[in-house]
Image: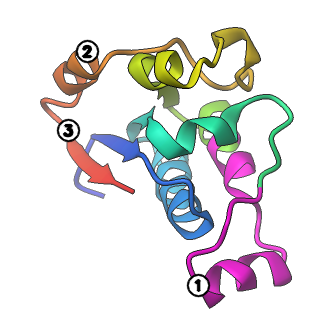
Amino acid sequence: MAAQKICVVVVSGTRERLQMAAMAASVAAVSGIEVTIFLSMNAVPHFIKGAPGNAPSEGAFGDLLVTKKAPDFKTLFRQAVELGDAKILPCSMALDIAGIDTDTLEPFVGEPTGLTAFLNAAADAQVWTF
């Protein structure tokens, strides 16, 4: 892979988009690429401790992910952090608006970050949005 730094913006709360973001982030991270994942809007509630790793499907493929027992997106995001060079940063504004306390987030999720700080970190990276 050519990029040495990838930033992934995840705003969707649907299974297919969360799954694709998690797959891209985890493969890149375990391949030695620095990955920063910025969680915002509809993605954030899926990362509250105890929230199930199943999100609503957009279509039939999302249902197939469950039927075929593909690893869920939360597992893949956790593995990206534990096995590679990835960090997951929740959007501070999204947390404030949704009334989510940082201590309720999964332990593999990092410190809340503002959009300005994320954009500065992404200045020299490929940026992918899901």
Q: CA distance from mark 3 to mark 1?
A: 31 Å
In this picture the colour scheme is rainbow
In front of the other: label 3 or label 1?
1
Q: Identify the image quadrant of residue 38.
A: top left
- Residue at image coords 43%, 47%: 11
- Give the residue at the far left of this rendering: 123
Q: Amino acid at mark 1?
A: Gly
As helix, strand or loop, the secondary structure at mark 1 comes to loop
* Vertical placement of residue 120 versus 16, above or below: above
Does the magenta run of residues contain 63? yes
First-in-chain label (3 vs 2) = 2
Residue 117: mark: 2
Q: CA distance from mark 1 to mark 2?
A: 34 Å
Tell whether label 1 touches label 3 (CB within 8 Å). Answer: no
Q: Amino acid at mark 3?
A: Ala
Label 3 neighbour load within 10 Å: few <14, some 14-19, many 20+: some
**Stretch of the chain drawn in magenta:** 54-78
* Vertical placement of residue 1 versus 8, above or below: below
- Residue at image coords 70%, 22%: 105
From the viewer's perspective, is 20 left or right of 52?
Answer: left
Q: Which residue is mark 3?
A: 125
- Residue at image coords 64%, 37%: 45
In front of the other: label 1 or label 2?
1
First-in-chain label (1 vs 2) = 1
